[in-house]
Image (tube, grey):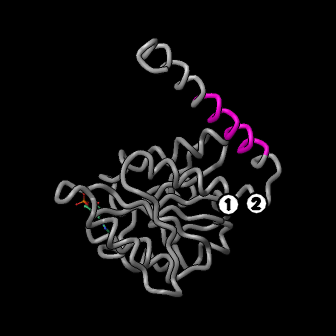
Amino acid sequence: MKRQGAGEHAGKGEPAGKLVGTWPPVAIVLGSDSDWPKVEPAAYALEEFGVRYSVSVMSAHRSPELVRDFASRAAERGVQVILAAAGGAAHLAGVIAAHTIVPVIGIPVPTELIGGLDSLLSMVQMPGDVPVATVGLGTGGARNAGLLAVQILALKDPDLQARLLRFKEELVEKVKSKDAALQARLGERVK
Ligand code: C2R
């Protein structure tokens, strides 16, 4: 699956705020490049379903104009879902949501300070009127952000719907084989 970084749209060194043309349907935005290892499971989930995405670094604190420009023009660029990941005082997702009607999924990035509770609470406690669909901390949360984006896109995409239904069936099979493996391990101990 082709991953598109902001540079591919913009030309080398051009700031994200100057990007032109149509973007992939999912935009992953990170508060810092240091967040990427924690956010990558979201990208893997998108790749599993063949969904194209861009990845950009911008910060509500450090580059507020870039964030405003990106968010206020995301819809016209064809972005349909934004995944916004940040750690600590994680205001990025909320600020993006303030400037767009494109659905924003927040990925709170775990921190060393209190395990990411700071990120989670900063992100999840939005005031009414400005929704950010915040997922949980950790690998499962980032993966769920990617899957949720796929589900949103699937509302208008029968092919993605079929893939998601297959995915659900595979989940059942995985659970059944986990059950079988545990039963075999436990043997006669459990009736
Ligand atoms: P550095 O590693 O660059 O020092 O960043 C980033 O998401 C990262 O987790 C440390 C942390 O600061 C976060 N950050 C935010 C925002 N911008 C950067 N929470 C924001 O705008 O919310």
Q: In the rendered view of the protein, which quadrant contains the N terminus?
A: top right
Label 2 neighbourhood size at 10 Å, few (<14), some (14-19), many (20+)? few
Q: Do the residues labelled 2 and 1 touch (CB within 8 Å)?
A: yes
Q: Which residue lies furthest to the left in this view?
A: 113
Quadrant in the rendering for residue 173: top right
Is 188 situated above or below 146?
A: above
Span highlighted in magenta in the image: 162-174
Quadrant in the rendering for residue 75: bottom right
Q: Measure the C-alpha gap from mark 2 to mark 1.
A: 6 Å
- Name the residue type under label 2: Leu
- Viewer-nearest residue: 175 or 33: 175
Reading the image, the residue beneath label 2 is 155
Residue 54 location (% of width, % of height): 55, 54
Q: In this view, does 52 lie to the left or right of 55?
A: right
Reading the image, the residue beneath label 1 is 152
Q: Is the magenta stretch mostly helix, strand or loop?
A: helix
Name the residue rendered at 60%, 27% in the picture.
176
- Local secondary structure at mark 2: loop
- Viewer-nearest residue: 74 or 157: 157
Label 1 neighbourhood size at 10 Å, few (<14), some (14-19), many (20+)? some
Residue 178 location (% of width, % of height): 52, 25
Quadrant in the rendering for residue 157: bottom right
Residue 165 colored magenta?
yes
- Local secondary structure at mark 1: helix
Name the residue rendered at 67%, 55% in the picture.
151
Q: Which residue lies furthest to the right in this view?
A: 158
Is 8 situated above or below 124?
A: above
Name the residue rendered at 27%, 59% in the picture.
116
